[in-house]
Amino acid sequence: MGLNIHLHTFPTLETERLILRQLAATDAQDAFLFLSDEETMRYYDPAPMARLEQVEKSIERHRRRFTQHEALRWGITLKGENRVIGNCGYSLDADNQLAALSYILSKHYWNKGIMTEALTAIIQFGFEHIHLHRIEAQVAYPNLASARLLEKLGFQEEGRLRDRQYANNQFVDERMFALINTNNLDG
């Protein structure tokens, strides 16, 4: 069974507290608030975004990659609010039925279970609707909170990638995590 990546419309997902929806150009200002924040962006490459135009181009790229069936990137909003507080999504590898997971959340919403809730929803969507076999994530070695999040979601650590990422003017190791869809073992 191949991947179901030819979605005609972007899938909006709803959880108990969240609406996960496609990012829009109108989200740029809200996204800039966390994508320009040094603490929020500490473990991410590229470095914090310095200009709103960078965020606008990033959103445009995410939307284009969806139409080209290469990726899905959800904006995270709290129910009752239409303000993006983070994002999460996949880069897809159809040939290998896998996706690379990435995510970011404004520091003002850390330690509230929001990213756990958001990732649970997109993992379920990835396995049940896209038919992914494997979801993997790379985490900067010092980012213990992100590693704990993945472990809580059932990901297993597979190894350490030495000097894998250049962030904050230095090379840092990354940890590779993966989650296998055991209901999709036939490929």
Image (spheres, rainbow, N blue to C red):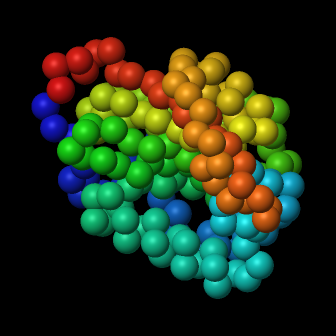
- Residue 170: % across, % down: 77, 59
Rendered-image quadrant of the C terminus: top left
Vertical side of 58 occupied by 141: above or below: above
- 50 left or right, relative to 186: right
Q: Is residue 79 visible?
A: no
- 114 left or right, relative to 94: right
Q: Nearer the viewer, residue 47 or 102?
A: 47
Q: Quadrant of residue 147?
A: top right
Q: Quadrant of residue 39?
A: bottom right
Question: Residue at the left extreme?
Answer: 1
Residue sitting at x 64%, y 84%: 53
Residue sitting at x 80%, y 44%: 109
- Residue 162: % across, % down: 63, 42
Q: Nearer the viewer, residue 153 or 21?
A: 153
- Residue 156: % across, % down: 54, 20
How many numbered marks have been drawn onto this rendered protein structure?
Answer: 0
Question: Residue at the front extreme?
Answer: 162
Q: Is residue 144 visible?
A: yes
Rendered-image quadrant of the N terminus: top left
- Residue 143: % across, % down: 76, 39
Q: Nearer the viewer, residue 10 or 99?
A: 99
- 172 left or right, relative to 64: right
Vertical side of 167 occupied by 109: above or below: above
Vertical side of 115 occupied by 165: above or below: below
Residue sitting at x 16%, y 19%: 186
